[in-house]
């Protein structure tokens, strides 16, 4: 029976269309729906809308259902997770919906789900950050050519390259923190968007559920649907841009034409026709998944971009774009953390004649140090390149912050840790 049953049956095709993938996706939300119900009925008991003995009967069943959901054994036979939980609670289940709507229930479920999944993602981002910084320190003195416009430009190092992506993750954590704050406002008790005449204590459920604050305005609490998902998806898109760009570098640098890095054989795949192939499919798939993730905010925007205030069933479609993004992102982070320790680099790259012109600026700066004006030194080196006579036999002297001579890894680590610590404040 539907929890909104009016005494008539829908056309089966209408049922199938309106339910959509809800049963499948609601399994992801089930533990959080049950957590929300446990907090709600504790509050209902405290305000006198449930008896203490009724709470004592309901909680053990909810705890059992919660464990089933965590273990993947929870099944939805009814319309959605909300109706399934009510049905499984027996006759007392008819009381647990007091002061709630499915609108604020699902808004709450998504926020609790998001909080848990963001915590898991942050742990993986921290692991990747440490790997990047560790390998940057290990390879800080191993030179590689730096490029602009895919033309050999100046000397770089594997340490500088890897450290750059570690610092990019700092910016991504800034955006994750902003999304974390937007997500951290409890919508429970806003009901269908206009509150309830029931004497609810929304501060109490906020405390029980561990939110730092509640969404004060009931209409705003409902308008948070879509806004929260978009903020989180934008933060994940930023992280995806970082991971995808790193994966693209690895695809390029592992090709025979570059040969800068190499994956262990176990991380490559072969060709069905070319016996010599060892393809970097891991990085190619990370790049593709991350490109997909960068499109998720656009999908969310298209669903909610022209909606008036209030709740609309359009919101249901958000689940299909939003809920799976966490698993996709976490899979990319996991595989990069697995691959990065085994990534080997080619040493003595810069001794190859292909990269001789990367030292042009070094020669210009040497001449400047000898008293030649920069523009004259620039032209002198340029003529030598054109004539094919350019040679550089000097040493590298890069001393400023952020150069190959001073990677500032401790400062990058300090910034990252400060940003992570802000999640606990």
Image (tube, rainbow, N blue to C red):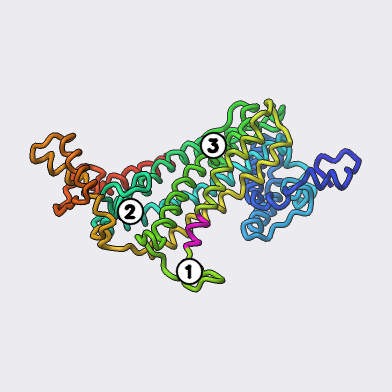
- Element on which disc 1 rests: loop
Q: Say left or right for 330 vs 256.
A: right
Residue 323: numbered disc? none
Q: Are marks 2 and 3 in contact (CB under 8 Å)?
A: no
The magenta stretch spans residue 282: yes
- Does the magenta stretch mainly form a helix, a strand or a loop? helix
User: What's drawn in magenta, residue-wise?
Assistant: 280-286
Q: Work out whether residue 424 can be spotted.
A: no
In this orientation, which residue lies closer to the viewer: 131 or 88?
A: 131
> Which residue is found at the position 24% from the left and 54% from the top?
356
Q: Residue 394 appears at what percent x and percent y? A: 14, 52
The residue wearing badge 3 is: 231
For mark 2, what is the residue? 133
Label whose residue precedes the other's in the sequence (2 or 3): 2
Q: Residue at x 83, y 45 (%)?
A: 15
Secondary structure of the residue carrying numbered label 2: helix
Tally of marks: 3
Percent position of residue 163, x then y? 33, 50
Is residue 11 shown left or right of residue 73? right
- What is the C-alpha distance between the residues marked 2 and 1? 31 Å
User: From the viewer's perspective, is residue 303 above or below residue 236?
Assistant: above
Instruction: Quote the CA–CA distance across marks 3 and 1.
Output: 41 Å
Rate crowding at label 3 as few (under 14), some (14 to 19) or many (20 or more) other CA atoms within 10 Å. Answer: many
Residue 277 tag number: 1
Identify the mark nearer the N-term, 3 or 1.
Answer: 3
| In front of the other: 363 or 104 | 363
Whether 144 is drawn above or below 82: the answer is: below
Looking at the image, which is closer to me, 336 or 93?
Answer: 336
Q: Residue at x 16, y 48 (%)?
A: 397
Quadrant housing the C terminus? top left
In the rendered structure, the answer to whether residue 420 lies left or right of residue 352 reads right
In x, y percent, where is residue 104?
A: 67, 36
């Amino acid at each position: 029976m539907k929890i909104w049953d009016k005494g008539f049956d829908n056309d089966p095709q209408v049922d199938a269309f309106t339910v959509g993938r809800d049963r499948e996706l609601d399994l992801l939300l089930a533990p959080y729906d049950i957590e929300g119900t446990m907090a709600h009925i504790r509050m209902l008991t405290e305000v006198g809308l449930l008896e203490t003995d009724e709470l004592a009967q309901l909680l053990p069943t909810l705890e059992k259902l919660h464990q089933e959901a965590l273990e993947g054994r929870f099944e939805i036979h009814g319309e959605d997770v909300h109706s399934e939980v009510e049905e499984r609670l027996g006759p007392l289940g008819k009381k647990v919906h007091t002061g709630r709507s499915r609108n604020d229930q699902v808004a709450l479920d998504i926020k609790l789900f998001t909080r848990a999944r963001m915590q898991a993602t942050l742990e993986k981002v921290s692991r990747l950050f440490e790997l990047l910084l560790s390998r940057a320190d290990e390879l800080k003195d191993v030179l590689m050519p730096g490029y602009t416009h895919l033309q050999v430009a100046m000397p770089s190092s594997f340490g500088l390259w890897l450290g750059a992506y570690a610092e990019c993750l700092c910016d991504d954590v800034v955006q994750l923190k902003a999304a974390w704050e937007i997500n951290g406002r409890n919508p429970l008790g806003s009901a269908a968007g206009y509150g309830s005449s029931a004497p609810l204590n929304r501060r109490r459920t906020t405390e029980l559920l561990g939110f730092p604050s509640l969404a004060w305005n009931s209409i705003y609490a409902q308008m948070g649907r879509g806004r929260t998902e978009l903020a989180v998806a934008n933060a994940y898109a930023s992280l995806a841009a970082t991971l995808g760009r790193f994966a693209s570098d690895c695809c390029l640098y592992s090709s025979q034409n570059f040969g800068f890095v190499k994956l262990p054989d176990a991380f490559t795949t072969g060709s069905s026709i070319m016996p010599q192939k060892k393809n970097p499919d891991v990085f190619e798939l990370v790049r593709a998944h991350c490109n997909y993730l960068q499109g998720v905010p656009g999908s969310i925007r298209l669903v909610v971009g022209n909606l008036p205030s209030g709740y609309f069933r359009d919101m249901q479609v958000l689940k299909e774009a939003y809920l799976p993004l966490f698993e996709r992102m976490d899979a990319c982070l996991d595989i990069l953390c697995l691959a990065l320790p085994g990534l080997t680099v080619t040493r003595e790259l810069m001794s190859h004649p292909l990269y001789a012109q990367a030292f042009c600026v070094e020669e210009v700066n040497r001449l400047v140090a000898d008293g030649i004006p920069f523009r004259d030194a620039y032209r002198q080196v340029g003529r030598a390149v054109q004539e094919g006579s350019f040679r550089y036999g000097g040493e590298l002297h890069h001393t400023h912050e952020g150069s190959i001579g001073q990677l500032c890894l401790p400062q990058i680590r300090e910034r990252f840790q400060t940003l992570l610590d802000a999640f606990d404040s």
